[in-house]
């Protein structure tokens, strides 16, 4: 996008119409204030949700419950879609494996993930609504080209491989119904492209809501699986592992965490909030959307665990998980209806996951290369954006259809790369949410920083364990977990000591953003991040230098080990 400067303090995308649509008619192009960080003029305007519409000038208060509910129905979408999309093909397989191998004894892991999901994604909500730009753009501009290239490059690789696993899920669902993947996979690819490249954010979101509605089949499926409610309630609140703690159980717990808290979620929800044109005035509604999504994803995961347990409880196949298709076939032997419901849920989860992950990648692509990247724009108006989306879908679908393709290696790579990217993604998230130049009055409060730091530490340990065990499968996982936890605690204490010494010799530079004065609520709601080029550079304190250096070392070592492992597996 090439903005033209004007004397009235605004900039306009002069190369094309905005491309926004209301009822099938183009909306007038909005002018982007010269002080705004928004990159694409299509990211400004009315909020056009699947379930309603809010005009850009609507600043009225929602005092009644009816008004709040109607507003929530318009805002709802980014949080719900990102969470349901996380229960994708990999998620279905992981939860089903937990049910088949360990019954419902791992339900407590899902309960513990609710605050993790909410804390991580709430920070993303604020970043999207306040800054008006995507996560990839913020990292690139605030931390330099190296970290921007790493974050986006790794994201592209990881997301593409994840899209391949979604098409693997589609092919498995097709196999259950006796359909050829050479027919179903291409049709699914065409459908994914068709529902995205319509030039209407509202039509895309409505399509996603239809698939989300189909995913509700998980709940009657669980109810038909003769659930043991007392046992389920016990396993939700009291941690236990059926058969005792061992390496396989610890790895599965880590896999549950990894498939539920994925790096692409951060990039997707922030960009989707920007694309939906949600502003700080509606942050609380988007927070409610995110909380609802977190509850839905955990409930869906629990339903799959319960069903996986029912399929094989008391049989010789209990504890011998093979694939999601094997679970569907096991259910089919008990009940034709349950087998069909599970296969439909797998297909639906794969479609939603593929749509969300691919769109997250295209959003990041547009952010980094400064291109138009909005679902409000038609194909002609955002060719490169839609071309990147189409290219990833077509290539991923093609790989799945190649006879003898290394699908097992791809699945392993996805798991390992997710472990590599997650700590760095959450570290950048926390840093950005404490950057006053970026969030102004919306920066994290101290209690949230403490909670987020604990979450990041736990994720870092789990990531390290996952990485090591992927590379060295014979390692003693419980012992490794304890050793890494102790090591992280020791390193944290040493880092705190170093920072205390460093602060004594560090001059006080004051408030970098000049926001020491308290703001009224209306001023806070109106505050938006200015253009990134106008922001003061990031202050590289001793603590930040230390942390980023450690993160860089972790990434380099892990990347080298991953390459070595990939070569071994390839041979």
Image (cartoon, rainbow, N blue to C red):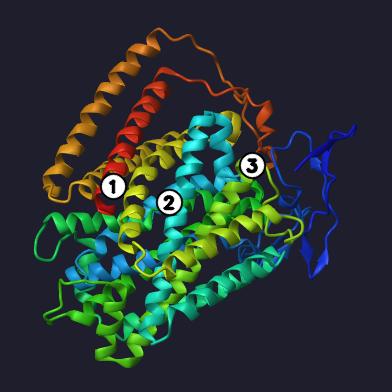
201 relative position to 381: left or right: left
Return the x and y of residue 463 as percentages of the image width and height: 29, 45
Mark 1 or 3, nearer chain start: 3
Which label sits in the foreground, 1 or 3? 1
Q: CA distance from mark 2 to mark 1?
A: 18 Å
The reply to whether the C-beta atoms of the residues labelled 1 and 3 are less than 8 Å apart is no
For image coordinates 60% across by 41% down, the residue present is: 368
For image coordinates 69% across by 33% down, the residue present is: 530
64 relative position to 417: left or right: right
Mark 2 or 1, nearer chain start: 2
Q: Quadrant of the N terminus?
A: top right
**In this view of the protein, which residue sits in the foreground, 198 or 108?**
198
Return the x and y of residue 301 as percentages of the image width and height: 34, 68
The reply to whether the C-beta atoms of the residues labelled 2 and 3 are less than 8 Å apart is no
Q: CA distance from mark 2 to mark 3?
A: 19 Å
330 relative position to 512: left or right: left
Q: Which residue carries the number 3 mark? A: 369
Above or below — where is 143 with respect to 93? above
Return the x and y of residue 189 as percentages of the image width and height: 54, 70
Mark 2 or 3, nearer chain start: 2
Does the image show residue 217?
no
Q: Quadrant of residue 492?
A: top left
**In this view of the protein, which residue sits in the foreground, 419 or 57?**
419
For image coordinates 11% across by 57% down, the residue present is: 245
Q: Which residue carries the number 2 mark? A: 158
Q: Secondary structure at mark 2?
A: helix
Q: Which residue carries the number 1 mark? A: 567
Q: Quadrant of residue 376?
A: bottom right
């Amino acid at each position: 996008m090439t903005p033209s400067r004007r004397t009235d303090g605004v900039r306009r995308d002069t190369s094309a119409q905005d491309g926004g649509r209301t009822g099938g008619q183009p909306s007038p192009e909005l002018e982007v204030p010269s002080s705004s960080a928004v990159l694409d003029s299509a990211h400004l305007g009315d909020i056009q949700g699947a379930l309603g519409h809010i005009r850009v000038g609507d600043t009225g208060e929602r005092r009644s419950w009816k008004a709040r509910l109607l507003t929530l129905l318009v805002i709802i979408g980014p949080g719900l879609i990102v969470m349901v999309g996380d229960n994708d093909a990999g998620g279905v397989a992981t939860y089903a494996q937990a049910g088949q191998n360990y019954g419902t004894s791992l339900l407590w892991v899902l309960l513990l993930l609710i605050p993790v999901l909410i804390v991580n994604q709430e920070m993303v909500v604020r970043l999207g609504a306040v800054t008006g730009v995507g996560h990839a753009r913020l990292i690139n501009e605030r931390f330099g080209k190296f970290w921007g290239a790493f974050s986006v490059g790794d994201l592209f690789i990881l997301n593409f491989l994840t899209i391949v696993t979604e098409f693997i899920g589609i092919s498995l669902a097709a196999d259950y119904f006796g359909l050829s993947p050479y027919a179903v996979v291409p049709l699914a690819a065409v459908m994914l492209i068709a529902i995205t490249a319509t030039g209407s954010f509202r039509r895309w979101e409505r399509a996603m809501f239809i698939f989300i509605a189909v995913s509700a089949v998980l709940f009657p499926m669980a109810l038909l699986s003769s659930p043991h409610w007392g046992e389920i309630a016990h396993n939700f609140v009291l941690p236990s592992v059926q058969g005792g703690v061992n390496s396989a159980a610890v790895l599965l717990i880590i896999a549950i965490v990894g498939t539920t808290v994925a790096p692409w979620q951060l990039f997707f929800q922030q960009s989707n909030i920007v694309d939906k044109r949600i502003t700080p005035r509606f942050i609380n509604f988007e927070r409610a959307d995110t909380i609802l999504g977190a509850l839905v994803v955990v409930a869906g995961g629990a339903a799959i665990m319960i069903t996986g347990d029912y399929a094989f409880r008391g049989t010789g196949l209990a504890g011998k998980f093979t694939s999601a298709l094997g679970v569907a076939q096991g259910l089919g032997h008990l009940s034709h209806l349950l087998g069909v419901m599970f296969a439909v849920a797998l297909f639906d989860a794969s479609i939603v996951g593929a749509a969300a992950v691919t769109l997250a990648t295209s959003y990041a692509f547009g952010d980094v290369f400064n291109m138009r990247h909005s679902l409000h724009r038609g194909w002609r108006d955002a060719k490169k954006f839609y071309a990147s989306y189409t290219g990833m879908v077509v290539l991923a679908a093609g790989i799945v259809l190649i006879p003898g393709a290394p699908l097992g290696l791809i699945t392993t790579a996805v798991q390992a790369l997710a472990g590599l990217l997650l700590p760095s993604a959450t570290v950048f998230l926390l840093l950005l949410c404490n950057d006053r130049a970026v969030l102004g009055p919306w920066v994290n409060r101290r209690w949230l920083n403490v909670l987020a730091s604990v979450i990041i530490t736990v994720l870092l340990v789990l990531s390290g364990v996952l990485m090591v065990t992927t590379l060295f499968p014979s390692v003693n996982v419980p012992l490794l977990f304890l050793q890494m936890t102790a090591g992280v605690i020791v390193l944290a204490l040493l880092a705190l000591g170093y920072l205390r010494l460093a602060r004594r010799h560090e001059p006080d530079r004051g408030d970098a953003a000049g926001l020491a004065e308290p703001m009224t609520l209306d001023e806070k709601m109106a505050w938006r991040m200015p253009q990134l080029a106008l922001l003061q550079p990031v202050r590289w304190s001793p603590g930040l230098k230390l942390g980023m250096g450690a993160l860089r070392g972790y990434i380099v070592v892990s990347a080298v080990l991953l390459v070595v492992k990939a070569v071994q597996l390839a041979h």
